[in-house]
Image (cartoon, grey):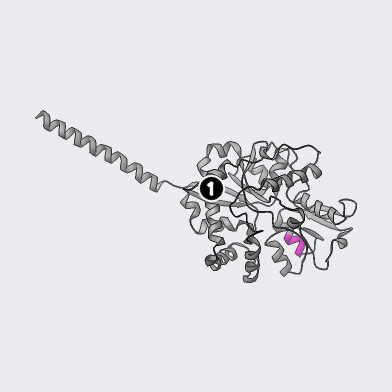
Amino acid sequence: MKMLKLVLSVATAGLMAAGAALPTSSMAQTAPPQVLRVNIFPGGFNWPIWVAQDKGFFAKQGLEIRTINTPNSREQLVGLINGQFEIAMTAIDNLLAYREGQGAAPVDGSGLIAIMGSDNGFLRVGARTGVTSFAQLKGQELSVDALTTGYAFVLLEVMERNGLILNRDYTTVQAGGVLARYNDLVAGKHAATMLIAPFDVLAKERGANILGDASAALGEYQGLVAGVRETWAKSNRAASVGYIRAWRDALDWMYDPRNKEEALAIFMKNVNGATRQSAETSYGILLDPKSGFTRDASLMIKGVETAVSLREKYGKPTKKLQPVQAYVDTSYHEEASRKR
């Protein structure tokens, strides 16, 4: 009798243990994805996000991405600092500005960090119809997002290299993010602005002229990055790494020529006003093997150094910035790059 009780007790314990394991496995499979709010400037440079959403690459990492469009860098960076969203796809210079107290808003951005790189900026100086040279911009008004952040310093540098100095030869007006500036440019409100692909392509289709490739003029330059609050990233390391992995998976898929037609369809679905022709042109620019999206989504340290040097030259108040490593954390990308 005692032996029977012992056997029953062992069997019951085994069943309970097995039963306890089942819900855990089931829960792991059915656990809801972690929602990440990602703030973006509207434009084709968000292509990897759209692909990762469409092809399930974010879902594979247990993530659900909800994008939020921003009208300008001020609202984007203030929102990131205040925790209104988890990630901002923003220019590295925006992070530098708010880290150093040089942003357009008086907020403390000392806790911001870049964890992933996207591109070299795809920066091109676009001019309204009839303006075909830098010389014709003398005495004209150019538009910027904010003269303290974003790609404004790149514009100032390109203009200076072409013999034109701010407030001596031309003036600037704050007009918001690239979508707003593109709309103003094609409407003829301003003489020129800094455009980001594919807005340069769309602008040309509407009669604007492209005066120069800023990225080529500056050499290696870090454009968009994934900016986060460092405290959030440390507390959500798996999500941060998963975001980078999904982005890399999207790039692998996009760079595969077999997926071109589907990639173009995703682009046209998400870019307002995109035509087959502009999508094809954007594909050639954004997915160029040498100058397109950063193939492995790494941060270009030399490119960050270029952004730092421009801020030291044009930022107000003038100050010496910290070493580049203070503004980036490559450990998340390194973890995302390891074999799974």
x%, y% of residue 68? Answer: 60, 51
Q: In which quarter of the image is residue 139?
A: bottom right
Which x, y percent locates residue 177?
A: 71, 53
Dividing the picture into quarters, in which one does residue 109 lie? top right
Q: Quadrant of the N terminus?
A: top left
Q: Which residue is drawn at 75% across and 64% down?
A: 186
Judge by depth and name the residue closer to the eye, 23 or 289: 289
Residue 185 sits inside the magenta stretch: yes
Q: Assess whether residue 201 is covered by the magenta stretch.
A: no
Question: What residue is rendered at 25% in x and 37% in y?
Answer: 16
Task: Classify mark 1: residues with Cα within 10 Å, few (<14), some (14-19) or many (20+).
Answer: some
For mark 1, what is the residue?
Answer: 337
What's drawn in magenta, residue-wise?
A: 182-187
Horizontal and vertical percent position of residue 138 = 89, 59
* Main SS, magenta residues: helix
- Indicate left or right for 331 with 327 as reference: left
The secondary structure type at the circle numbered 1 is: helix
Give x and y (percent) for residue 281: 65, 67
Count the labels in the image: 1
Of all residues, the one furthest to the top in this rendering is 2
243, above or below 203, in the image: above
In the image, what residue type sits under mark 1? Answer: Ser
Q: Residue at x 59, y 62 (%)?
A: 270
Residue farthest bottom in this picture: 277
